[in-house]
Image (cartoon, rainbow, N blue to C red):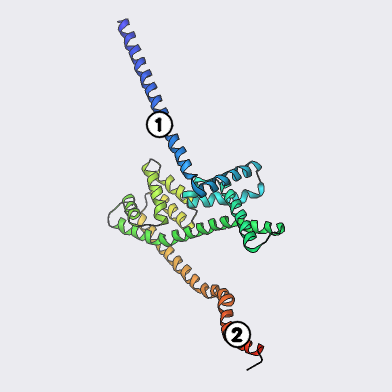
Amino acid sequence: MLLLLISVTVCIIVILAVDYIVTFIKNLRLEKVFKERVDNANVARRRGISGNLLFIAEKIGNYVEKKKIKQLEPMLEKIIQDSRIMGGFYDTISPYTFVGIQAIAGCFLVFFIAVLLDVYNPVLWLPIFAIGFFIPYLLLGEQVKAKHRAFFRQLPDMLDLLCLMMEAGLDFNSALSRIIDAEKGELSDEFHIAQQEIRLGKARNDAFNEMAERIKHPSVTSVIRSLTLAFNTGGSLVPTLKALSGQFRLERMQLAEKTANEAPLKLMAPLLLLIFPTIFMVLFGPIILMFMNGGF
C-alpha cells in the first residue's frame, strides 16, 4: 500500500514537472516570436527617408533627455497630453523624440532660408531655427484643436441616435455598437477603443473614464460623467442624453454663428494686403505711368 502511494505521488510530481517544462518552453517560443515581430516592425518603421529622420530624432531626443533641461518640461507635458489625444503615430514615439523632430525642422528651415535667400549671418540663424523648432509643436496643437472640433460636431448627432435606439428597445451596449458600426468619425473611433477595452475585460466605467481622461474634451467629459452616474445609480439614460444633446446642439449653433460673424474681420487682412493693392495697381497704374512719361 505504501509502495502504491509513493508511486502515485512520484507520477503526479513527474506529470506536473513535465507540464511545467512544456509550458515554459512554449512561453519562450512565443516570446521569441513576439520579439522577432517587434524587431521586424521597428526595422520596417526605420526604412526610407522618414525612418532615417526618425532615427536621428530619437538620438537627439535621447541626448536632450540626458541633459534634463528644466525649461522644456512644460512643453514636454503639453506634447505628452496632445500625443495622447491624437494617438496613432504620436503614441509610438516619446516626447523627447518629438523634440528631436522639432530640432530637425529648425535645422531644415535654417538650411532652406540660407540657400533660398542667401542668408549666411549666424546671428539670424538663431531666430529662424526657433521658428522652425516651434512649427511642429504648433501644428500638433492645431491638430488637437481640429480633433476637438470634430468631437463637438459629432457629439449631438451621436447622442440623438443613441436615444432613438434605446427608446426603440435596444440596451446601451447594443445601441452604441450599432452607432460605432454605422457612424464614422473621431468620436466613434474613441468609443470603439473604449468598447474593445470593455470586451477585453475592463470595467465599463473605467474604460469610459480613461477615454475622457485621454481626449480631454469638456463636452465628452460631461457625457461620460452622466453615463457613469446613471450606471452607478441605475437611473434612466435617455432623458439625460436628450438634455445633453439639446445643450450641445445649441452650443454648436452659437459657435457657428460666432464663426460666421468673425468671417468679415478675418477677411480684412487678405483684402488689405492682397486684393486692394492689386485693384489700386490696375486702376491707378496707367495714370501714374502716363504722368511719368510726360502727361496725357
- Measured Cα–Cα span from mark 2 to mark 1: 78 Å
Q: Quadrant of residue 22?
A: top left
As drawn, the residue found furthest toward the left would be: 169
For the residue carrying disc 2, how many other residues have a C-alpha within 10 Å: few (<14), some (14-19), or many (20+)? Answer: few
Q: Which residue is mark 1?
A: 30
Quadrant showing the N terminus:
top left
For the residue pair 226 and 264, the one nearer the viewer reads as 264
208 left or right, relative to 282: left
x%, y% of residue 140? 53, 55
Tell me what residue is drawn at x 45 percent, y 39 percent: 40
Q: Is residue 201 above or below residue 116?
A: above
Cβ atoms under marks 2 and 1 closer than 8 Å: no
Q: Is residue 195 above or below residue 247?
A: above
Q: Quadrant of residue 244?
A: bottom left
Q: Quadrant of residue 197?
A: top left
Q: Is residue 258 above or below residue 138?
A: below
SS at circle 2 = helix
| Residue 213 seen | no
x%, y% of residue 118? 66, 62
Tell me what residue is drawn at x 37 percent, y 52 percent: 235
x%, y% of residue 276? 57, 80
SS at circle 1 = helix
For the residue carrying disc 1, how many other residues have a C-alpha within 10 Å: few (<14), some (14-19), or many (20+)? Answer: few
Q: Which residue is mark 2?
A: 285
Q: Which mark is residue 59?
A: none
Q: Amino acid at mark 2?
A: Gly
x%, y% of residue 213? 49, 50
